[in-house]
Amino acid sequence: MSAFLDVPASDFESSVTFWSAVSGYAPSARRGDDEEFLTLVPPTGDDHLRMQRVGDGPPRIHLDLHVPDPRVAADRALALGAVEVADHGHVVMRSPGGLTYCFVTHPAALAAPPASWPGGSRSIIDQVCLDIPRPRFDDEAAFWQSLLEWPPAGSSYAEFERLVRPDGQALRVLLQRVGGEGRVRAHLDLACSSRERELLRHVGLGAHVVSDRKAWTVMSDPAGMAYCLTDRAP
């Protein structure tokens, strides 16, 4: 699994600068018909973060699921309740709750190590949290458990449910019950050896603090996309 940050053109360049600095990963050469795609390349390991310049609308996250045969994987997902959007060789899908994801073939199995920062702290973008409206939660959670074949692991917080990450995966998956209606969305989480130091570093790079909780801090990047700093060990 890898995560795509879809950012409107007006904020794209500043977002590339921000997420490259946050992750410690270098932006690749641009690609696509309009040079709308790039990869954030870690010093070692396979990439699991990519960026796409999109049209108007708020920034968002979509997922790439790396499979041997996208068409076979898409047909299986349809049987589980997904919706097919387009087949370009890679297959664009939506979950039952409306989260966009793609089946792709390129490899992404070797996780990158955490980045080390001045002062001795370390961090890594290692989790995607699916923000699921409460009325959709049971059906959406069952879909992702079946699609990924990752069993649930529970959580010490009532609003969350973790999925068990197999070996060889760069990204964890966390499911969160949220209020309201609408589509399922996603945000990125960082594991931090020092949340306080990481918060100061991110604010210095242009992020804003949205709210602070016992074990995590909700942040907003320069384009207004939410993400979280957590106390999980990198």
Image (cartoon, rainbow, N blue to C red):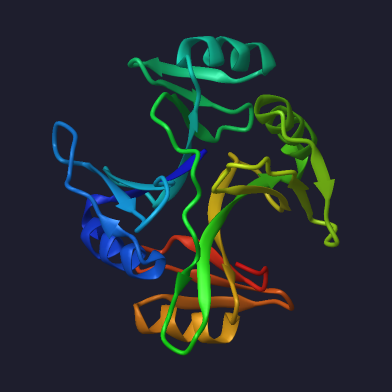
Q: Residue at x 18, y 38 (%)?
A: 31
- The front one of 74 and 2 is 2
* Residue 102 on image: x %, y %: 45, 28
Closest to the observer, 169 or 186: 169
Q: Which corner quadrant of the image does residue 46 belong to? A: top left
Seen in the picture, residue 162 relative to 230 is either above or below; the reply is: above
Above-or-below relation of 114 to 169: below
Q: Quadrant of the C terminus?
A: bottom right
Residue at image coords 59%, 82%: 194
Residue sitting farthest toward the bottom: 119
61 to 232, vertically: above or below: above
Q: Nearer the viewer, residue 55 or 161?
A: 161
Residue 185 in the image, given as x and y percentages of width and height: 56, 45
Residue 130 appears anywhere in the view? no
Tell me what residue is drawn at x 60 percent, y 41 percent: 184
Q: Is residue 138 above or below residue 129?
A: above
Residue 111 place in picture, x, y as percent: 50, 49
Residue 87, visible in the rendered structure: yes
212 lies left or right of 40: right
Instruction: Name the spot of residue 59 as percent of width and height, x first.
Output: 39, 52
Residue at image location 49% in from the left, 17% down from the top: 84
For residue 78, side relative to residue 215 (left or right):
left
* Side of 44 where 193 appears, left or right: right
